[in-house]
Image: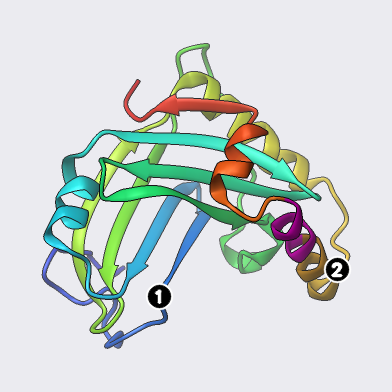
């Protein structure tokens, strides 16, 4: 297993990667990967230590994790489908064991230009968001997969209807401060 460290490459062969955002739940781990082109010092600091806020929305059959960090990393969204995760990494989410169970989200900020890790952070999600996230992922595991073409149509329809992350925030089922 490769160990992530700030100032080191994201992976042994990663030199650069496309800009973008990914949320994944695989191998029992929640991960938010932020690939920014030349992250600013303020973006790096806000991902490391800024107040974080998260929300969960569903649109056109697509699950979206919404997030922000401090003032520099404004509200953004990451679509997710369990079916996109490689089969060998798929795990069913366990239901929270108590009403106070909190999921841990691994946040990684990369400089997309060189693949170097700029910030690492673990943040807990509120019990309400943890429960909603587990239920939404579990529901996806029980939904038949219609294929990539259908998923791409659903994703495009969701973004047509909710063109901005702020639009998705309006329909979010749960919203919470990180670590709450």
Query: Which marked residue is nearer to the observer: mark 1 or mark 2?
Result: 1
Residue 35, given in percent of the width and then of the height, sits at: 35, 69
Please say which color scheme the image uses. rainbow
Q: Classify mark 2: residues with Cα within 10 Å, few (<14), some (14-19) or many (20+).
A: few
Q: Quadrant of residue 115?
A: bottom left
Task: Identify the residue at horizontal 60%, vertical 66% (top origin).
Answer: 88
* Image quadrant where one finds the C terminus: top left
Q: Main secondary structure of the magenta part?
A: helix
- Regarding residue 94, the answer to whether it shows in the image is no
Q: Between 99 and 97, which is closer to the camera in this rendering? A: 99
Give the structural element (helix, strand or loop) at label 2: helix
- Which residue is denoted by mark 1 in the rendering? 19
- Which residue is denoted by mark 2 in the rendering? 150
Q: CA distance from mark 1 to mark 2?
A: 24 Å
User: Where 145 falls versus 176 (above or below)?
Assistant: below
User: Where 38 falls versus 99 (above or below)?
Assistant: below
Task: Identify the residue at horizontal 71%, vertical 61% (top origin).
Answer: 83
Whether residue 92 sits left or right of residue 144 in the image: it is left
Residue 64, given in percent of the width and then of the height, sits at: 61, 48
Q: Quadrant of residue 114?
A: bottom left
Task: Identify the residue at horizontal 40%, vertical 75% (top origin).
Answer: 19
User: Where 51 falls versus 28 (above or below)?
Assistant: above
Q: Which residues are magenta?
A: 155-161
- Regarding residue 76, the answer to whether it shows in the image is yes
- Number of labels in the image equals 2
Residue 129, given in percent of the width and then of the height, sits at: 53, 27
Residue 5 magenta: no
Name the disc covering residue 75, or none. Answer: none
């Amino acid at each position: 297993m490769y160990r992530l460290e700030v100032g080191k490459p994201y992976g042994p062969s990663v030199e650069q990667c496309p800009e973008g955002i990914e949320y994944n739940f695989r191998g029992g781990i929640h991960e938010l990967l932020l690939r920014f082109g030349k992250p600013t010092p303020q973006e790096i600091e806000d991902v490391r230590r800024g107040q974080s806020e998260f929300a969960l929305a569903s649109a056109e059959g697509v699950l979206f994790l919404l997030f922000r960090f401090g003032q520099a990393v404004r509200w953004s969204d990451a679509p997710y489908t369990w079916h996109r995760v490689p089969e060998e990494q798929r795990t069913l989410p366990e239901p929270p064991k108590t009403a106070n169970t909190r999921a841990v989200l691994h946040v990684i900020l990369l400089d997309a230009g060189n693949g170097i890790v700029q910030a690492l952070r673990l943040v807990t999600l509120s019990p309400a968001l943890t429960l909603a996230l587990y239920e939404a992922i579990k529901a996806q595991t029980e939904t038949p997969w219609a294929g990539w073409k259908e998923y791409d149509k659903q994703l495009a329809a969701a973004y047509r209807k909710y063109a901005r992350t702020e639009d998705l925030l309006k329909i979010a089922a749960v919203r919470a401060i990180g670590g709450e």
